[in-house]
Amino acid sequence: MSTGDTNDGPLSDRTNLVIVNTAERYQSVLDRVATAARAAGRAPESVRVLAAVKTQSPEAIATLVDAGGTLLGHNRAQELAEVAPALATLRPGATLETHFIGQLQTNKAARVVDLVSCVHSVDRMSLARKLATAANSRGRVLDVFVQVNASGEETKAGVRPDDAVAFALDVAALPALRVRGMMTIGAHSSDPAVVDRSFAVMQELSDAVVQAGLDAPELSMGMSQDLDAAIARGATMVRIGSDIFGPRP
Ligand SMILES: *Cc1c(COP(=O)(O)O)cnc(C)c1O
């Protein structure tokens, strides 16, 4: 007898339930983004939602695509290489925009360039050069974000805030790379003031980089826990995983 547990029903019902949940979760993220944008006096359309798809199956991602979520962010080169063709088979003709958002080893840069239009995690010149060489040899321009360690946490990747503007200018000087803006992972803290400070640093850097003459006004920041705070500080792209797909195993 059913106990009301969502896993009790026949498989077809369960599959439907997952589909409804992903679509509903995605919609509620869009609603939350719109509310946060309006509260900050910004247009809801000024913030894009990128789905962080790490650990998700191609089927789960296809469900999101059906719900209109077509901006996807991958963390691992290997997973990207496996999921991208599977997704193309599941949803042939779907227009997807795929970005890379995780830490990237220099020796995987060229492989990633073949599968994405944008890399959010450029944090060292050796990586920038590899990406530029790969994009150039394919006759392409690759969009990039400069990753900044705005919170100063030792475990986090990214350039120091003090170095960010000069580094962005160096990256922008490479042919075949177009710097769109800066990216960060917000402070890992339960104190809203600490989280806000990390995003405020980014807002200042974003102004500084534009002031320095780069047409790179975007800010990739905000995740499931802190998207509202990021939008209040000018995020133009939030990267959302668990609030769209449910908790990761
Ligand atoms: C996983 C991930 C996210 C999304 O995190 P959630 O807390 O699941 O929303 C965003 N950015 C990066 C770089 C990630 O690795």
Image (spheres, grey):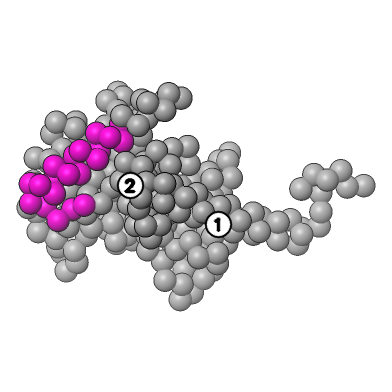
Task: Tell me: is circle 1 under 8 Å from ligand 1.
Answer: no
Query: Which corner quadrant of the image does residue 209 belong to?
Result: top left
Horizontal and vertical percent for residue 169? 9, 47
The stretch of residues the image draws in magenta is 198-217
Task: Tell me: is circle 2 under 8 Å from ligand 1.
Answer: no
Identify the amino acid type marked 2.
Answer: Ala
Q: Nearer the viewer, residue 60 or 38?
A: 38
Query: Which corner quadrant of the image does residue 125 belong to?
Result: top left
The residue indicated by pointer 2 is 235
Identify the amino acid type marked 1.
Answer: Gln
Residue 121 visible from this viewpoint: no
Residue at 81 percent of width and 57 percent of height:
10
Could you tell me which secondary element the residue under label 1 belongs to?
Answer: helix
Other-residue count near label 1 (Cα within 10 Å), few / some / many at <14 / 14–19 / ≥20:
some
Residue at 46 percent of width and 68 percent of height:
88
Could you tell me which secondary element the residue under label 2 belongs to?
Answer: loop
Other-residue count near label 2 (Cα within 10 Å), few / some / many at <14 / 14–19 / ≥20:
many
